[in-house]
Image (cartoon, rainbow, N blue to C red):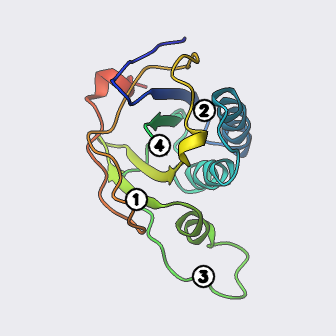
Amino acid sequence: MNQKLTQPGSPVRNFSVLLSPTPRGARLARLLATEQLRTWGLPLDPARLIVAELANNAATHGRVAGRNVRLLLYVVGGTLRIEVTDTRGDRLPHHRPADPIAESGRGLTLVAALADRWGVTPGLPPRKTVWAELALPAQESPEPDRSRSGPTCAPPALPTGEKGPRQAPPLPPAGQTHPRE
């Protein structure tokens, strides 16, 4: 589905897909995000690394049998926002130092290092969304006339450039971006 939302001086690009909360779904999230970023003419890294980490976390910690994970990418002006929504709103992630000898536990450290901002937004029960934002250099913002996939959605405010977890703007009502599962 290709849709275009035109705002004066601020093109919006949007891509959304439902995936299984499995390692295969996490891998597919990374591959689909990579292809969408290529379509938009945006740099692949660090965005695909962030997508891979957030999708893997959703598959590992946010998995509920029979419920999907949503990957949402959108560009507003010079900001790429990556969101991964799962159905384990009772398990909010938090950034903590990893044990030096542990085999896991460094994912959010990686996200914090690569993203300009990131955070967690509780959604309609039982959902939560982990998001990250990347500022795009002016010359790498997508062309306004290129086609986009997915329903259009724009955040209420542009990022301030601060790093670290912050409360994100509320998600649109359930019927608009989160169909019943």
Amino acid type of disc 2?
A: Leu
Instruction: Tell me how far mark 1 sits from mark 4, CA to CA.
Output: 19 Å
Mark 4 — residue? 78
Mark 3 — residue? 98
Amino acid type of disc 4?
A: Gly
Contact check, label 2 and label 4, Cβ < 8 Å: no
Disc 1 versus disc 3: nearer the observer: 1
Counting residues from the start of the chain, the first of labels 4 and 3 encountered is 4
Residue 64 showing in the rendered view: yes
Amino acid type of disc 1?
A: Gly
Contact check, label 3 and label 2, Cβ < 8 Å: no
Mark 2 — residue? 19
Between residues 134 and 16, which one lies in front from this camera angle? 134
Residue 90 showing in the rendered view: no
Q: Quadrant of residue 114?
A: bottom right
Q: Residue at x 44, y 28 (%)?
A: 12
- Residue 152 position, x and y percent, is 41, 22
Counting residues from the start of the chain, the first of labels 1 and 3 encountered is 3
